[in-house]
């Protein structure tokens, strides 16, 4: 709601508002009629708004002799939920059968009024239909010069445009064009410059076809408010806070006809109520709380989402009572983890709109679209997309026959696809793989090859092939319906009641019905657009869980709490970006342009959320505000999360009230308090330490303990366990996934062959520099490797990139160097923990520059560096935290390990040895090779200018490094468990990740 009347001009853009009469007689009131405008009732937070309303309805309208006496009353709420509560309250007060008043959500009220006023009734268009209509009307009328594009590229902009037009309708503004809108996307600039013409064209198209939209319908009703056939005196408008201009006009006309308005607030009114009161010049009547109402607020900073939920569970279990409790989830994605965490015997009612795009059924449909989008007509389906499909829980639950699931077939198929190693496969090739299943592999599951083949072919036909031909909404609906039917018929239903059924219901009733009703249901449209359109539509759909108010524990979204009052409230995730949510970037209309067009500024949204949040808090007796301080991100590891500015505001208010700082009173919950499933041991106990020692000793005897063995343990003891103790092979990868490793081998071999002629002599770059030769060697090695099977375009890219890297490296060698050795194997016996161990290492190249040996290790992956610090602290304990700390401080062990071997345990010439990584993966392939600096390629262990300082180094390699190795060995042999990765990011690169139960 904007302050006062709409301006005639704002920031230069002309705006008109279809302004009904505001002075003299109330709007919609006929000459001679009585005018009585009721004071607005303002119910204190300490009272229940619904209860106060119910009391007034009973007092004013209820006649015990007439069970129909309440029917003449109309109550309008902002949403549907309070209806159930009102009915419940009336039942409590009346205690006998009655017919309840007519209660509406605003949306229902508008629809009902429209049916009475619109002649003929207009069809409300869905979002895709509005975009379709706009596109065609612009094309036909040529009203907008930039429209000559395809519907596919217009669609995302069209969605923004029709969304913006909804705002104009609701705010009763005819948009003006913006001349020279600077700082926006060029396409947005075109739209904004012709905004007025585009809007007019849209409006005319809607009018000409008898269509409307929710915003346009509201606008129309606001204009026709005086003709509304409603007796204002029996109308109650309850619990609204912020109004659009159209709502304001509509409600005001009802109020001026005698309707009663109920707010919830204290005497010091919240901002938007103050504006509302000023605008209507309304009197207020306060209904105060009986005593000084003051909720107890607990501020709790938890480590992450699961720590928060665990705390909620702890409180609920401790205080088993009959209090009306609400758990409020500002982010609905916390719903599933919460349900998992609640005590099993707890009755709970859910009232929130769960986003359809977060459900498993949508996950499957979206993945099927991706599979089709990445389909290569020559080569088939991309294997990773295909694997994601067969790993989906819906497929795993498919029945092979009446008494068997097909999970084993899909599992075997996955390993065969990996073994085959082809990045793309046709469905026929995949079906042929079933032939290669070993008899006994299937036999143990009592499955015959024929049965497995039939099972797979049915999945292919019903779930996958149908996507190829999809070219219209009709095809899409038919295909999805077929898939849903298939799963309903063939799936083993989950043992417990599953929310999935609700989601599938929404899928059919909301999504498919909207599509079926579309204006372009049968039109042929581009598949890319078809999928985009489906994704766009799904992003708006929520599964509306609505429940029973009598259940003592309610789980709600924040907006679903409007008007309701609870004894105890938990609010989860009171974090910045969640409450209030982060602002969506609008590429069409950046926030700074909104006032120019007369639209409310974005801050109003925050004010609305704040009001609902603090109303909920202030109306409860006991409140727990929880937020997370950390979150784990797949690619960035642990991230800090900030508590919400709403917490800051409440804390500040509480501190003022109490006259002391509350920061120290915030309860802090560390990760240790995680619920069972998070703290589900991220470790494997070392049961037989004797056996472990024998195994390690045998490795030492056979090939020696390598730097990578220690490095692996430091980075992830569980991976160490898989790789060195169990000797598990990582799952086979297709060529594209192995690309990095195989390419690394090819580059190593190429460099070895390039420098081979100079072993024992001097490589002088001014004479021997030969980029053509090194590239020829590379091509020959590439063609001998698995990478020869890669797609041609991929190979071209690899060749270009590697050529550039190798040239950059050769260019960086600027002084003559003696090549001492290549691929040099070194070993050393050392005594650690009272046992003699063999250490082993293979060094890529050893150079001698002047009188210093340089140990070189080629790195072809991400950039590697390892620095010498004498002061590194070796931990004293052998737990997870100590290992984590060591890894953090040390990072890598490899170069020092090689120096240790080369100098025979620090005894021979440490002063004259250095080491370096040659990073061959850092150069950007599109840069000029001469611009890559030497220091970006070569990362020294000891900076050459510091080589002179030798004392610390000698003692480091003779004493400290053996101690470090001893510590790591002891950790391997004696710590109680194999722990998971010391850096969660590692899991996303780990070869064992597909099968690892401990990955982050
Ligand atoms: S996935 Fe993560 S926890 Fe599992 S072995 Fe790999 S790095 Fe370790």
Image (tube, rainbow, N blue to C red):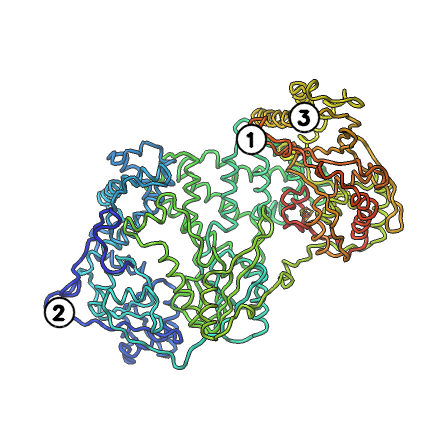
Give the mark, 2 or 3, whose residue is nearer the N terminus: 2
| Residue matched to label 3 | 814
Image marks 1 and 2: residues in contact by CB distance under 8 Å = no
| Residue matched to label 2 | 33
Q: Residues within 10 Å of mark 2 (few under 14, many from 20)?
A: few
Nearer the camera: disc 1 or disc 3: 3
Image marks 1 and 3: residues in contact by CB distance under 8 Å = no
| Residue matched to label 1 | 380
857 relative to 25, above or below: above
List x then y, in percent, for residue 543. Answer: 44, 55
Give the mark, 1 or 3, whose residue is nearer the N terminus: 1
Quadrant for residue 320, please give it. bottom right
Q: Residues within 10 Å of mark 3 (few under 14, many from 20)?
A: few
Q: Relative to 693, is 507 on the left or the right?
A: left
Quadrant for residue 680, please give it. bottom right
Give the alpha-carbon distance from disc 1 to disc 3, as whole Å.
48 Å
Residue 325: give its label: none
List x then y, in percent, for residue 399. Answer: 59, 47
List x then y, in percent, for residue 361. Answer: 51, 48
159 relative to 930, above or below: below
């Amino acid at each position: 709601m904007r302050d006062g009347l709409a301006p005639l001009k704002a920031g230069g853009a002309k705006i008109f508002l279809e302004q009904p009469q505001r002075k003299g007689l109330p709007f919609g009131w006929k000459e001679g009629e009585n005018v009585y405008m009721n004071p607005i009732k303002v119910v204190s937070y300490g009272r229940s708004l619904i209860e106060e309303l119910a009391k007034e309805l009973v007092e004013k309208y209820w006649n015990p002799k007439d069970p129909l006496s309440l029917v003449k009353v109309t109550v309008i709420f902002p949403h549907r939920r309070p209806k159930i509560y009102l009915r419940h309250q009336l039942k409590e007060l009346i205690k006998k059968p009655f017919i309840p008043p007519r209660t509406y959500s605003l949306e229902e009220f508008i629809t009902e009024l429209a049916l009475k006023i619109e002649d003929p009734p207009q069809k409300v268009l869905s979002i895709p239909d509005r975009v379709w209509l706009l596109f065609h009307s612009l094309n036909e009328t040529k009203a907008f010069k930039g429209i000559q594009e395809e519907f596919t590229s217009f669609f995302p902009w069209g969605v923004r445009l029709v969304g913006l037009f909804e705002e104009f309708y609701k705010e009763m503004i005819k948009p003006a064009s913006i001349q020279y809108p600077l700082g926006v996307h060029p396409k947005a600039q075109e739209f904004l410059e012709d905004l007025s013409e585009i809007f007019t064209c849209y409006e005319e198209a809607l009018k000409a076809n008898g269509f409307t939209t929710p915003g346009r319908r509201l606008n129309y009703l606001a204009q026709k408010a005086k003709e509304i056939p409603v007796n204002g005196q029996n109308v109650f408008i309850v619990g609204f806070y912020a109004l659009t201009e159209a709502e304001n006009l509509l409600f005001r006309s009802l109020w001026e006809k005698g309707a009663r308005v109920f707010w919830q607030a204290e005497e010091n009114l919240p901002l938007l109520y103050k504006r509302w009161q000023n605008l209507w010049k309304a009197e207020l009547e306060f209904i105060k709380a009986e005593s000084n109402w003051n909720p107890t607020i607990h501020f709790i900073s938890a480590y992450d989402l699961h720590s928060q939920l665990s705390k909620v569970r702890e409180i609920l279990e401790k205080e088993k009572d009959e209090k009306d409790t609400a758990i409020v989830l500002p982010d609905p994605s916390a719903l599933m983890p919460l349900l998992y965490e609640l005590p099993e015997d707890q009755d709970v009612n859910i009232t929130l709109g769960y986003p359809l795009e977060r459900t498993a059924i949508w996950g499957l449909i979206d993945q099927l679209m991706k599979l089709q989008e990445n389909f290569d007509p020559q080569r088939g389906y991309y294997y990773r997309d295909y694997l994601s499909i067969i790993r989906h829980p819906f497929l795993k639950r498919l029945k092979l026959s009446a008494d068997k699931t097909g999970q084993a077939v899909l599992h075997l198929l996955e390993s065969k696809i990996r073994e085959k190693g082809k990045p793309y496969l046709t469905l026929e090739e995949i079906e042929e793989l079933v032939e290669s299943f070993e008899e006994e592999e299937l036999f143990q599951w009592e499955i015959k090859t024929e049965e497995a083949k039939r099972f797979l072919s049915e999945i292919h036909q019903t779930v996958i092939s149908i996507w190829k031909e999809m070219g219209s909404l009709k095809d899409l609906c038919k295909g999805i319906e077929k898939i849903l039917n298939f799963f309903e018929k063939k799936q083993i239903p989950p043992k417990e009641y599953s929310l999935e059924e609700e989601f599938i219901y929404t899928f059919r009733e909301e999504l498919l019905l909207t599509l079926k009703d579309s204006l372009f249901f049968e039109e042929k449209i581009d598949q890319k657009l078809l999928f985009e359109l489906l994704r766009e539509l799904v992003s708006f759909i929520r599964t509306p869980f609505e429940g029973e108010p009598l259940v003592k524990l309610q789980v709600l979204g924040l907006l679903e709490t409007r008007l309701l009052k609870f004894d105890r409230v938990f609010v989860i995730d009171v974090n910045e970006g969640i409450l209030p949510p982060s602002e969506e970037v609008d590429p069409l209309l950046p926030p700074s342009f909104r006032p120019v067009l007369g639209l409310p500024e974005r801050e109003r949204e925050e004010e609305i959320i704040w009001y609902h949040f603090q109303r909920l808090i202030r109306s409860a007796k006991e409140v727990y505000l929880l937020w997370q301080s950390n979150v784990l991100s797949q690619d960035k590891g642990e991230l800090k999360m900030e508590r919400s500015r709403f917490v800051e505001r409440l804390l500040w208010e509480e501190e003022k009230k109490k006259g002391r700082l509350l920061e120290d009173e915030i309860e802090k919950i560390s990760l240790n308090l995680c619920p069972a499933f998070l703290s589900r041991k991220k470790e494997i106990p070392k049961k037989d330490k004797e056996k472990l020692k024998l195994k390690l000793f045998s490795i030492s005897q056979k090939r020696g303990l390598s730097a990578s063995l220690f490095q692996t343990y430091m980075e992830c003891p569980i991976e160490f366990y898989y790789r060195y103790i169990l000797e598990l092979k990582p799952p086979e990868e297709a060529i594209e996934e192995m690309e990095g490793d195989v390419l690394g081998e090819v580059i190593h071999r190429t460099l070895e062959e390039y420098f081979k002629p100079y072993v024992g002599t001097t490589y002088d770059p001014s004479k021997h520099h030969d980029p053509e030769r090194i590239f020829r060697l590379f091509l020959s090695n590439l063609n001998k490797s698995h990478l020869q099977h890669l797609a041609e375009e991929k190979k071209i890219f690899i060749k270009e990139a590697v050529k550039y890297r190798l040239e950059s490296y050769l260019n960086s060698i600027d002084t003559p160097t003696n090549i001492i050795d290549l691929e040099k194997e070194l070993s050393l016996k050392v005594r650690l923990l009272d046992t003699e161990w063999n250490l082993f290492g293979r060094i890529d190249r050893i150079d001698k520059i002047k009188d210093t040996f340089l140990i070189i290790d080629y790195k072809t992956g991400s950039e590697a560096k390892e620095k010498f610090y004498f002061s590194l602290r070796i931990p004293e304990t052998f737990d997870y935290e100590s290992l984590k700390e060591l890894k953090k401080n040390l990072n890598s062990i490899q170069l020092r390990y090689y120096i240790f071997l080369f100098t025979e345990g620090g005894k021979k010439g440490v002063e004259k040895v250095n080491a370096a990584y040659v990073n061959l993966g850092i150069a950007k392939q599109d840069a000029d090779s001469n611009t890559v600096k030497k220091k970006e390629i070569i990362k020294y262990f000891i900076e050459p200018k510091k080589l002179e300082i030798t004392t610390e180094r000698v003692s480091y390699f003779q004493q400290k490094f053996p101690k470090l190795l001893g510590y790591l060995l002891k950790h391997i042999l004696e710590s109680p468990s194999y722990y998971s990765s010391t850096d969660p990011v590692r899991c996303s690169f780990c070869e064992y990740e597909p099968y690892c139960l401990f990955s982050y």
